[in-house]
Image: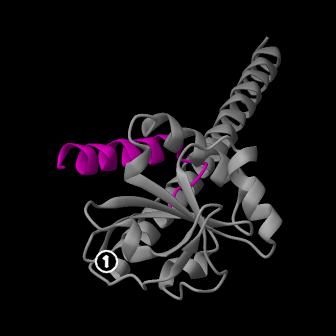
């Protein structure tokens, strides 16, 4: 009887050990993913903050902007009121651009004059078709590919900033498709800022 009882206890303890060990491995895997997401999110926030600080208050270059209708200097587009500028190129993350376009178009549907898109491409045809393909209502201007030489361009991602009538920049933000809610909050906050203050 005692040998049978001993085998029974060993068997029960072995089963408990495997169950606990399996649960521990699952928890480690879950914690690892959460930690990885925390690191990715922290890095994303840090980069956004560093870029915000690097361009805030800088004077934007008075670049030439073209669309189908005319060619103007950037300062001409921002003569009276601050504008939200969405900058991207055909080399940037296309899924990021698409999700931003939908949020931007839906948030500014009643204030298209408060935002512009600065787009660059290696091919004029891509730039000309971009607005039509993406069904954008926001004014889009093509700029030379490497005309902006500031820090945000080095990341090869689309980004936003506010351009003020004195050509100073502020409120930088680089969207990421992994964090769509942050992008929506940014765009809605900027809309309140530039649409309600004028």
**Residue shown at the point (74%, 66%) measured from the top left:** 90
- Vertical placement of residue 1 versus 82, above or below: above
On the image, which quarter does residue 137 sit in? top right
Query: Is residue 97 rendered to the left or right of residue 50?
Result: right
Residue 133 in the image: x percent, y percent? 76, 45
> Is residue 101 placed above or below 119 in the rendered structure?
above
Region in magenta: 174-198
Residue sitting farthest toward the left: 197
The answer to which image quadrant residue 92 occupies is bottom right
State whether the magenta stretch is mostly helix, strand or loop. helix
74, above or below 148, in the image: above
Question: Circle 1 sits on which residue?
Answer: 167
- Number of marks present in the image shown: 1
The residue at 47%/40% (across/down) is 181
In this picture, residue 111 sits left or right of residue 44: left
Residue 157: percent from the left, percent from the top?
61, 67
Q: Is residue 81 magenta?
A: no
Q: How many other residues sit within 10 Å of disc 1, few (<14), some (14-19) or many (≥20)?
A: some
The residue at the point 37 percent across, 51 percent down is 114
Is 193 one of the magenta-colored residues? yes
Q: Nearer the viewer, residue 9 or 124?
A: 124
Q: Quadrant of the N terminus?
A: top right
Question: Is 142 situated left or right of 151 in this image?
Answer: right
At x 72%, y 35%, the residue is 22
Residue ranking furthest to the top: 1
Q: Position of residue 97 (x, y in %)?
A: 64, 53
């Amino acid at each position: 009887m005692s040998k049978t009882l001993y085998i029974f206890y060993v068997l029960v303890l072995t089963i408990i050990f495997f169950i606990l060990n399996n649960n521990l491995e699952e928890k480690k895997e879950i914690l690892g993913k959460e930690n990885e997401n925390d690191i990715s999110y922290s890095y994303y926030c840090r980069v956004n903050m560093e870029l915000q600080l690097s361009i805030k208050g800088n004077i934007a270059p008075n670049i030439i902007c073209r669309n189908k209708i005319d060619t103007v200097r950037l300062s001409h587009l921002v003569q009276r009121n601050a504008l939200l500028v969405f900058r991207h190129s055909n080399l940037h993350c296309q899924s990021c651009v698409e999700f931003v376009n939908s949020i931007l178009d839906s948030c500014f549907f009643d204030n298209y004059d408060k935002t512009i898109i600065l787009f660059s491409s290696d091919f004029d045809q891509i730039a000309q078709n971009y607005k039509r393909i993406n069904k954008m209502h926001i004014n889009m201007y093509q700029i030379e590919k490497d005309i902006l030489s500031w820090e945000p361009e080095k990341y090869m991602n689309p980004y936003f900033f506010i351009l003020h009538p004195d050509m100073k920049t502020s409120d930088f933000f680089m969207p990421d498709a992994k964090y769509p809610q942050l992008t929506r909050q940014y765009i809605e906050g900027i809309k309140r800022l530039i649409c309600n203050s004028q």
